[in-house]
Amino acid sequence: MEILGIGNAIIDVICKVEDKFISQNNLAKGNMKLIFDENEFNKLLFDLKIEKTISGGSVANSIVGLSQLGNKVGFIGKISDDDFGEKYEAGLKKENVEYIYSKRKEKLPTGTCLILITPDSERTMCTFLGTAGMISEENIDLNALKKSKITFLEGYLWDEGAPKKAFDKAINNSNKVGMSLSDKFCVDRHKPHFLELVKNKLDITFANEEEIISLINAKDFNEVINFGKQTKKLLIITRGSKGAISINGDDVCEIGIKKNLNIVDLTGAGDLFAAGYLHGYINNFSQQECLEKGTEMSSKIIQKIGARI
């Protein structure tokens, strides 16, 4: 196997709603709300017609993108033996992803992201992590780690306790390990731990400009470049309208963005950028070509609804 992803296994449940549904349920239109109460989540879902389900989660989106580019990939993520769990597993297998997890009935249901699309195409999300966030070291398959060239992790999954032990097991038994910092909220919450990972444990780190600046408390982007050079690891940063940059020791490579795109949905842009870059990396592309492939994949995805090309 070329790349093994480990991440939050979250099924995207897409439903069309009227604006009044958003206001009646006190949701902030266009935003994401984390829901911790299963009953509250089920109440939201109760009367809705499900248009479509997609096996999602940040790293899972990247892994599917890599599969679509013809790479042999696998994924580990915790689900429950329930209806959404069955759909999640089937969805990944349909995309030729080897799903390396034996589901069983858990106390919490399969993680779900309810994506509510209003008539103006705006997406409002409600996420119930369910059993996805309860991943532990016993869920991490040692053989899968050892036979993969790269293990790819997501910052969203990192937390104290069992998830940290799962991370440690993955990192300590991988041939090479990459991670996406995922979100500024994750970075701010786990800053000392993430900094230790980036400096000493990871071979490849993906971040956006906001996340990396927050991680190292940089005053400007030159400090980020100097930090990247000093770590002597591969650091890839997406910079929105400024394009993307990769830093590998003293080798710094920059690329601009694709112009005149019909942007309809930014969901999955970072996930698919990582897929494109990693595809280039394992197929021995130059840094420039890796950045170009990442940009090509993210440019495609932002012109579609959802995180599937």
Image (cartoon, rainbow, N blue to C red):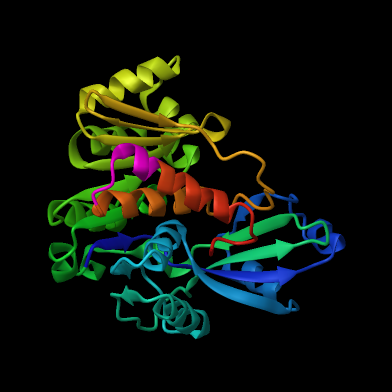
- Report the residue at 47% width, 78% height from top: 91
Residue 190 in which image quadrant: top left
- The location of residue 138, given as percent across then percent down, is 21, 69
Stretch of the chain drawn in magenta: 284-291
Which residue occupies the foreground of this view, 114 or 106? 114
The residue at the far right in this view is 20
200 w.r.t. 59: above or below: above
- Report the residue at 62% width, 38% height from top: 259
Q: Is residue 138 left or right of residue 21?
A: left
Which residue occupies the foreground of this view, 300 or 63? 300
- The location of residue 148, given as percent across then percent down, is 19, 63
- The location of residue 277, given as percent across then percent down, is 36, 48
Residue 126 in which image quadrant: bottom right
- Report the residue at 19% width, 41% height from top: 201
Q: Is residue 168 magenta?
A: no
266 w.r.t. 220: above or below: below
Classified by dominant secondary structure, the portion drawn in magenta counts as: helix
Residue 182 visible in the snapshot: no
Q: Is residue 219 left or right of residue 305?
A: left
- The location of residue 90, given as percent across then percent down, is 44, 82
- Report the residue at 69% width, 52% height from top: 264
44 w.r.t. 161: above or below: below
260 w.r.t. 23: above or below: above
Q: Is residue 259 left or right of residue 58?
A: right
Residue 125 visible in the snapshot: yes
Q: Quadrant of the N terminus?
A: bottom left
Q: Is residue 285 magenta?
A: yes
